[in-house]
Image (tube, helix red, strand yellow):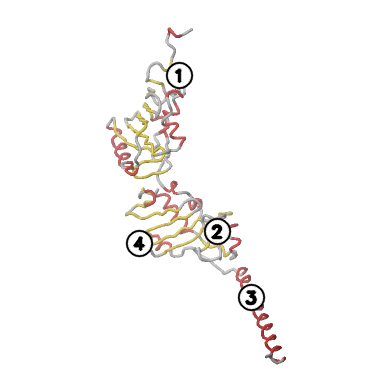
């Protein structure tokens, strides 16, 4: 049975008309999409208009960047980092973030084309051209602010909402540092609290992982070089050979931190420094696999050093600090690398 010619022609026309309509709708949709990307809304004023209220309510700040995913949690009057066993966060870092976010002012809307996000550093964190996502929540978990921050160009910081394609430029407040947004977790922590100053160090005792214990000493802060006081029978390679290991606590920065009860390794050496004031700082080095961690203790040899010793002991009690390879080399340098055994008179040619 065959359809009449008119019926077949009508069906054919309907199909062709439907395809034409779909093509037209698709073209219109593309045109609207392109137009929306090219159209820029007018935006003025503060980026986070209610930030003053949000900052008071903020309980958690989550940071996601190319290398790290960590959070800052309010703990009474201070902020701590749960990913580091709730070690305290540097208060000046949180204050800097507060000042930056509160002072951001719109310069205008920018592209809404997601293919251009990476050029502004506004792709998803972890991808090429990825930005830094900062999410602020209150104590109940409600989101107070959620932005992806990208590159800074000529005083303008690019940003967007994570679930939107539209991007914006905002003026960075004068005197603030937008680079803090992309800092890794360890730079939010206070890990450079040992800073005795070279002139303060009087005596150092070092027990390396391998080799003999030795003592470096000088009689006054104006004396440039540390002398090798022990063991007998060794001569420094140069007059200043001991200055590197002796002065390492002039300023020491650790790389990471964790609760010391999480370590299972053994102490493999120590570095102990005494100041002219009478402060003694001892660093026991703990081997944890291929890494080396420091257990810091402080004590006072004089009344003048008592307050500083108590403050440092309170800060470091219960914590272990990760040492960099460079710091470890200076803290635990073997005696054989700074001195040679003296020849006995009978051995001389």
Q: Dot 4: what SS?
A: loop
The percent position of residue 329, horizontal first and vertical second, equals 45, 32
Q: Dot 2: what SS?
A: loop
Q: Dot 3: what SS?
A: helix
Q: Which residue is mark 4?
A: 139
- Residue drawn at x 52%, y 54% as measured from the top left: 126
Confirm whether residue 66 shows in the render.
yes
Nearer the observer: mark 4 or 1; the answer is 1
Circle number at residue 206: none
CB under 8 Å between callouts 2 and 4? no
Q: Which residue is mark 1?
A: 340
The percent position of residue 345, horizontal first and vertical second, equals 43, 8
Q: CA distance from mark 2 to mark 1?
A: 57 Å
Circle number at residue 26: 3
Q: Which residue is mark 2?
A: 123
Based on the displayed image, in which of its 4 quarters is residue 141 positioned? bottom left
Nearer the observer: mark 3 or 1; the answer is 3
């Amino acid at each position: 049975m065959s359809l009449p010619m008119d019926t077949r022609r009508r069906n054919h026309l309907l199909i062709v008309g439907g395809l034409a309509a779909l093509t037209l709708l698709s073209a219109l949709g593309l045109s609207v999409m392109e137009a929306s990307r090219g159209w820029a809304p007018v935006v003025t004023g503060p980026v986070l208009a209610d930030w003053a209220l949000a900052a008071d309510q903020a309980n958690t700040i989550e940071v996601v960047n190319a290398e790290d995913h960590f959070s800052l949690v309010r703990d009474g009057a201070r902020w701590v980092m749960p990913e580091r066993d709730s070690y305290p966060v540097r208060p000046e870092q949180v204050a800097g973030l507060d000042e930056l976010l509160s002072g951001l002012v719109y310069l205008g809307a920018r592209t809404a084309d997601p293919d251009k996000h990476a050029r502004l550093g506004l792709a998803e964190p972890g991808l090429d051209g990825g930005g830094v996502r900062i999410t602020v929540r209150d104590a109940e978990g409600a989101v107070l602010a959620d932005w992806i921050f990208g590159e800074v160009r000529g005083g303008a910081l690019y940003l967007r909402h994570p679930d939107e394609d539209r991007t914006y430029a905002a003026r960075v407040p004068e005197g603030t540092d937008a680079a803090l947004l992309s800092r890794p977790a360890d730079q939010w922590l206070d890990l450079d609290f040992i800073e005795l100053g070279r002139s303060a160090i009087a005596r150092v005792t070092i027990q390396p992982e391998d080799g003999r214990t030795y003592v470096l000493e000088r009689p006054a802060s104006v004396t440039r070089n540390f002398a090798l006081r022990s063991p007998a029978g060794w001569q420094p390679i140069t007059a200043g050979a001991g200055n590197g290991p002796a002065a390492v606590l002039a300023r020491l920065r650790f790389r990471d931190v964790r609760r010391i009860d999480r370590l299972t390794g053994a102490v493999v050496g120590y570095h102990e420094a005494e100041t002219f004031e009478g402060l003694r700082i001892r660093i026991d080095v703990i081997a944890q696999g291929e890494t080396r961690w420091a257990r810091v203790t402080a004590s006072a040899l004089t009344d003048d050093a008592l307050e500083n010793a108590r403050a440092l002991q309170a800060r470091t009690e219960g914590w272990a600090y990760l040492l960099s390879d460079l710091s470890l080399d200076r803290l635990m340098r073997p005696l054989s690398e700074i001195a040679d055994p003296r020849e006995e008179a009978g051995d001389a040619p």
